[in-house]
Amino acid sequence: MRISLISGNRERLPDAVIPLGLLYVSASIQKEHTSQLLDLCFEERPMEALAAHLAEFAPDIVALGMRNIQNADYSGFSNTIDYYAQLIEVIRGATTAPVVMGGAGFSVMPEELMRRLRPDYGISGEAEMAFPALISALEQKTSFSAIPNLHYFAGGKEMSTPSPAGFLDMGSLPRPDRTLADPRYYTEYGIESLQTKRGCPLRCDYCTYPIIEGRVGRTRSPVDVVDELVEITAGHPDVRHVFVVDSVFNLPRAHAKEVCREIIKRGLTVPWTCYANPLGFDAELAHLMAQANCAGIEVGADSGSEEVLKRLRKGFTTQDIRTLHQLADRAGIPDCHTFLLGTPGESFDDVLQTLDFIVDLDPFSAILMAWVDDYEALDPALAKERQALREQVLKLLDEHSTEFSWWSIPSIGVNYDASLFDVLRKRGHHGPLWQHLRNLSPGKTNVRRVRSSPEAHSRK
């Protein structure tokens, strides 16, 4: 069959991200089917490009990948769901082929998105086995009962199949089919993506990773991981940085150490960045990561309030955050901590406490985001309920934005805009761009506890 793979994501701030999920899916069907990938990320007129692609390729099935529901900068949704509805409308106008949705964004709320967007089928979670099974069932007109996590309509009713008994064995999956990747990911951004495992054992209250990948860490062989890293750098000379997309690289810690040892053994020098967690981070790991050319870690610290960390079920304390920062600093690894302000149940005083904590922690970089719930995209009442505190948080951040010039506040465009990122790239900077902001910063113009601001304190 002829399979059209459509990557709908158009986010390019701070960087365009290669559609790794669709490349894995492509690799799972390439032996038996003919597929083409249309990546809308770089298309100036995405609807026209989509219609032209479908007319030329004449697919039997259209698979539409949805990476995110809201913007990468936590500023809102930019009518993301309406955009995907328009994509499906264009597909319907160009072909009678069935539409299958999937991807991380779709997997967050598959039932709601099936009702809103009305694709023919949807696959939540991992699709490397489910999608080939669906193709086979459609081709042979057989039952869908053995296809896990499938959502569809039958007789006007919403139907879904059970989740699988277990998740996929990472060692059995073919590597992503990078032959389909748009070369502009390499020539314009120079960043590739690599996955060493799937699954996250943590129980953060808001996180969707366990929904998509499960709670049991399924690791790849460190040798296979580094073989792929060699393949990436050898096959794409424009790749100057690799981002490890695991939900948490250092869990399990033993596996992370073995990956680092394998990189060191092979003498690879490509810089890489990863997500790290205060749990499972020790001095030995920090040393190995530095030796393996880790250029930075991104930490979902979330809050500087012990109560908020407990409410979010993060599993670590503010002291654990401090310990990670100290270990990374001693190893020479820049650390970027992301904080979510105004999460459910959080007071404005909690927000102030977090800002004071960031000042005291003084990480290499900090990214501050006002909390936005994915479900606000479908629930205007919920969005309105959360908006008041969000506006208060953003007003406070805006008032202090010049005092901490190495912080990024994406929601209001502080150290987060296309022109700044273009300047950094033209200067030859690569990798996640927070790693270069502090070097450009004029310095700490007025380091002080945020709570000391009379104006801020009066708004508690």
Image: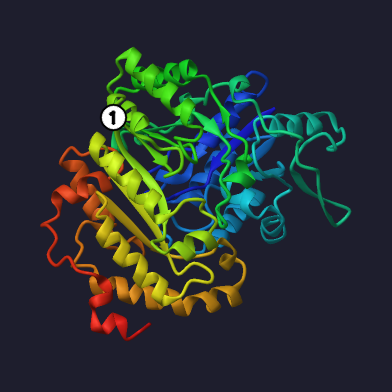
Which of 346/330 is in front?
Answer: 330
- Mark 1 neighbour density, 10 Å: few (under 14) some (14–19) many (20 or more): some
415 to 143, vertically: above or below = below
Position of residue 339 measured from the top left corner of the image (x, y, whole percent)? 39, 59
Residue type for callout 1: Ala
Q: Residue at x 57, y 65 (%)?
A: 377
User: How is the model colour-coded?
Assistant: rainbow
Q: Residue at x 57, y 68 (%)?
A: 376
The reply to whether residue 36 is in sight is yes
Is 299 left, or right, of 174 in this rendering?
Answer: left
Residue 14 in sight in this render: no
Quadrant location, the N terminus: top right
Which image quadrant for residue 383?
A: bottom right
Quadrant position of residue 132: top right
Q: Give 134 or 398, whichever is nearer the viewer.
A: 398
Q: Residue at x 54, y 64 (%)?
A: 373
Q: Quadrant of the C terminus?
A: bottom left
Q: Position of residue 117 (x, y in %)?
A: 66, 57
Residue farthest along the top direction in this orientation = 266
Q: Relative to 58, is 417 on the left or the right?
A: left
Outermost residue to the bottom = 458
Q: Which residue is mark 1?
A: 290
Secondary structure beneath label 1: helix
Q: Position of residue 171 (x, y in %)?
A: 59, 20
Q: Is residue 342 above or below residue 99?
A: below
Residue 183: x percent and y percent?
37, 31
Task: Write down the quadrant of residue 95 in the picture.
Answer: top right
